[in-house]
Image (cartoon, helix red, strand yellow):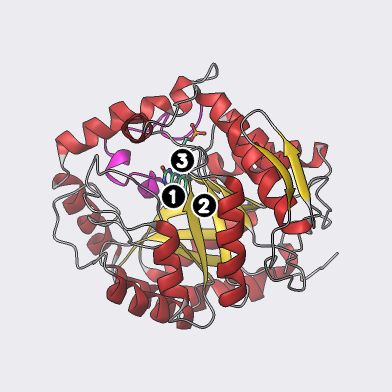
Amino acid sequence: MSTNPTRPMKFAYWVPNVSGGLVVSRIPQRTEWNLDYNVLLAQTAEKAGFEYALTQIRFAGSYSAEYQHDSLIFSAGILAKTEKIKIITAILPGIDHPAVVAKRGATADQIFGGRWAINVVSGWNRREFDMLGVQWLEHDERYSRSREFVEILRGSWSQDHFSYVGKYWTLKDYPLRPKPLALPGRPMPEIFQGGNSLAAQKMAAAVSDWYFMNGNTLEGHKEQIDHVAKLAAANGRALRFGANAFVIARETEQEAWDELERIVQSADATAVSDFQEAVKEAGLATAEKKGMWSSATTRDLVQYNEGFKTNLIGTPEQIAERIYSLRRVGVDLVLCGFLHFQEELRFFGERVVPLVRELESAGGAREPAIPAALISPLGGTHISHS
Ligand SMILES: Cc1cc2nc3c(=O)[nH]c(=O)nc-3n(C[C@H](O)[C@H](O)[C@H](O)COP(=O)(O)O)c2cc1C
């Protein structure tokens, strides 16, 4: 078990590999979705204290995101021109085959020094599946399929001749070579997971390394963390938690809130309402009617992962305090979105991250107890807290 008492908050950002930025708004944005822009952004981010960047996977524009680069190829493009940052590639089970992703991921991990990770998303946009002729499963079944997907990744990455008989995929003697790199404390690429319904939570507790949450209040994040951590402990596992936030850091609180108001006032109302309709296939389609977007207002959805709710909006000092509060309820990573990515990400690195580090060193002793690192019953995933 690793016991670093300070356990600093980790930072990630959304890779703008789709057009339109992170808000469904007509407000002018100085954010581009091409590779050159993204390489510079990643180079800025790795100097600014960001450890990860998360790509998005989409096959059609619905609400904004009219153009979408492939998540895996785009990840490789960024990895090739950076040195430290880890790229988390979003993948959709069903549209992608797990053994093929296991191979591509292993190659990316080998080439780029163990800096590749995956975000397994289970899908909410039925139109994409219908468009590609891939069977659309009902909500909880999509998570059963994703669970198999992760079991196959772990099996292929850890066994010499991997065989698997599942409901969705069967593998016979798959000798994946080379395996991904085995690094100290990271025997294979980290597996992140999107989706916040009960089915998503059970899946995360059983097979994922990380559980990503949509934007939420501090209490909302705490509630989910406590619940998912308890489910994981019942499986003899521990996992980490990432929270989404749309950051608006300005010199004064008033400037930050004025910016938010401009974003919301310029919202593309038709696109937001189309999105609101499409996401009824997510948490609202479950028996509990809980999950991502299930309680989102129209205003919340202007940032399509509800990032305003996390309230990282204000001065650098206010934002740092709120990040420290998130850390204290068990959030391990803040996933940041920005309006003007390049300049705002740099400002965040220069002005917010150092304040978070100060708060952490001053209050380190008050941190919550560190759970024991545990061995996953599935693939031998060692979850260490560094
Ligand atoms: C941080 C994060 C990133 C996500 N990225 C994507 C993505 O790139 N593409 C996609 O189709 N869904 C993405 N999702 C959606 C979820 O994976 C999931 O399919 C959906 O929200 C349904 O969640 P539910 O379990 O709450 O119903 C993401 C979710 C989160 C929290």
User: What amino acid type is highlighted by mark number 2?
Assistant: Ala
Q: Which x, y percent locates residue 266?
A: 13, 48
**Mark 2 Cα within 10 Å, few/some/many (few <14, many 20+)?**
many
Q: Which residue is mark 1?
A: 310
The mark lying in front, picked from 1 and 3, is: 3
Up the image or down, 289 lies above or below 228; here it is: above
User: What amino acid type is highlighted by mark number 1?
Assistant: Thr
Image mark for residue 243: 2
Q: Which image quarter is the N terminus in?
A: bottom right
Q: Is residue 277 left or right of residue 83?
A: left
Q: Which x, y percent locates residue 259?
A: 21, 58
Mark 1 touches mark 2? (CB < 8 Å):
yes
Pick out the residue farthest to the top: 287
The mark lying in front, picked from 2 and 3, is: 3
Image mark for residue 90: none
- Dot 2: what SS? strand
Tell whether position 308 is magenta. yes
Whole-number angstrom distance, CA of label 1 to CA of label 2: 8 Å
User: What amino acid type is highlighted by mark number 3?
Assistant: Ile
- Dot 3: what SS? loop
The mark lying in front, picked from 1 and 2, is: 2
**Mark 1 Cα within 10 Å, few/some/many (few <14, many 20+)?**
many
At x 24% / y 57%, what residue is drawn? 19
Front-lying residue, 250 or 381: 381
Q: Which residues are magenta?
A: 290-309
Q: What type of secondary structure mainly makes up the magenta span?
A: loop
Q: Which residue is mark 3?
A: 95
Q: Which image quarter is the C terminus in?
A: bottom right
Task: Say which label, 1 or 3, has the lower sequence index.
Answer: 3
Up the image or down, 205 lies above or below 133; here it is: below
Up the image or down, 333 lies above or below 228; here it is: below
